[in-house]
Image: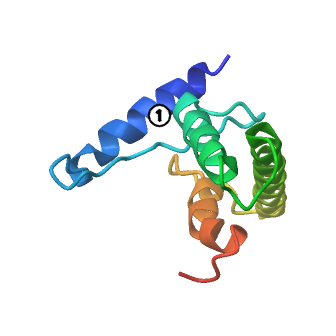
């Protein structure tokens, strides 16, 4: 499991490597989740480490790191399901369009979804 997440992590690392400066102490963590909820290893390790820091000795949160991590996992999972639903609903709506396929080999749905994605994610018209 997690093959797709590993591949996507590698792709993100390669894509953003020119933005990362070791001299400045930059650290990039590719945050990857598979559609059915599997976390990328680096995202999981980052959140686990953060949960341990936030719940460590002297912390204002007297809970186990695993409880905090579980809470984050549930919230992220719900957000991902909602986002996937919105994309499917938009695709279903667009599929009813008689001009769904333009005959030139361009899928109008793909083009429309790319334009709609910021709005579907709650970002408004950007």
Q: Is residue 98 above or below residue 69?
A: below
Residue with the mark numbered 1: 9
Q: Nearer the viewer, residue 14 or 84?
A: 14
| Residue 8 in picture, x, y percent from top left | 49, 33
What residue is rendered at 20% in x and 56% in y?
Answer: 24
Indicate the secondary structure of the residue bearing disc 1. helix
Q: Nearer the viewer, residue 6 or 103?
A: 6
Q: Nearer the viewer, residue 41 or 93?
A: 41
Q: Nearer the viewer, residue 3 or 112?
A: 3
Q: Is residue 102 above or below residue 41?
A: below
Q: Residue 115 appears in which quarter of the rendering?
A: bottom right
What residue is rendered at 59% in x and 48% in y?
Answer: 53
Q: Is residue 30 above or below residue 9?
A: below
| Residue 92 in picture, x, y percent from top left | 83, 56
Task: Farthest residue to the bottom: give it.
Answer: 125
Number of on-image labels = 1
Q: How is the image coloured?
A: rainbow
Q: Is residue 80 above or below residue 44?
A: below
Q: Residue 110 appears in which quarter of the rendering?
A: bottom right
| Residue 29 in picture, x, y percent from top left | 45, 44
- Crowding near the residue tagged with mark 1, few <14, some 14–19, many ≥20 C-alpha atoms within 10 Å: many
What residue is rendered at 82% in x and 48% in y?
Answer: 63
What residue is rendered at 59% in x and 32% in y?
Answer: 40
| Residue 57 in picture, x, y percent from top left | 65, 47
Q: Quadrant of the N terminus?
A: top right
Task: Farthest residue to the top: give it.
Answer: 1
Task: Farthest residue to the front: give it.
Answer: 58
């Amino acid at each position: 499991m997690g093959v797709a997440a590993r591949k996507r992590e590698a792709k993100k690392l390669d894509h953003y490597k020119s933005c990362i400066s070791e001299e400045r102490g930059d650290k990039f963590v590719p945050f990857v989740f598979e559609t059915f909820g599997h976390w990328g290893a680096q995202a999981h390790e980052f959140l686990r480490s953060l949960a341990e820091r936030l719940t460590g000795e002297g912390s204002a949160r007297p809970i186990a790191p695993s409880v905090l991590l579980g809470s984050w996992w549930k919230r992220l999972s719900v957000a991902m399901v909602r986002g996937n639903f919105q994309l499917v609903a938009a695709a279903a709506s667009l599929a009813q369009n008689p001009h769904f396929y333009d005959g030139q080999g361009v899928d109008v749905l793909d083009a429309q979804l790319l334009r709609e994605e910021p709005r579907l994610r709650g970002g408004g018209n950007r």
